Amino acid sequence: MSIVIGLISLLFYEQHFTFFEQVRSERHDGATWEYVGHQKPDADAESIVFQCIDVDSEEPCGEPYILWKLKK
């Protein structure tokens, strides 16, 4: 089981590598995570967005959104 979780984590990290590198760089410069509530993602910022999925049709519903933002 731990191998499967490790593999999934590795694939997630690889897929979002630029996001994690940007976070590392900005945190090094003093940025911190702040809760911003349900809002549209910034088009110019790297982000991992949330979006609801309809249970019956398995299709996305609603607009993509973020809850946290890295701010200086």
Image (cartoon, rainbow, N blue to C red):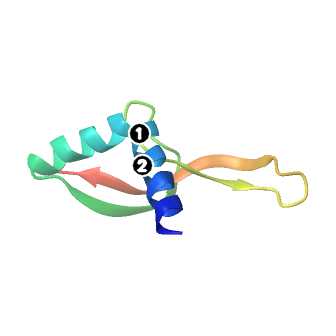
Which residue occupies 17% across, 52% down?
31
- Amino acid carrying label 2: it is Leu
Foreground of the two, 19 or 42: 19
User: Crowdedness of circle 2 by 10 Å Cα count: few (<14), some, many (20+)?
Assistant: few
Nearest the eye: 19 or 12: 12
Q: Which residue is mark 1?
A: 14
**Label 2 SS:** helix
Task: Give, as a three-letter code, the residue at label 1.
Answer: Glu
Disc number at residue 38?
none
What residue would you read off at disc 2? 10
| Mark 2 and mark 1 residues within 8 Å of each other at the beta carbon | yes
Residue 12: x and y, percent?
A: 47, 47
In the displayed orientation, state which residue is furthest to the bottom: 1
The answer to whether residue 46 is visible is no
6 relative position to 33: left or right: right
Q: CA distance from mark 2 to mark 1?
A: 6 Å
Q: Is residue 23 above or below residue 4?
A: above
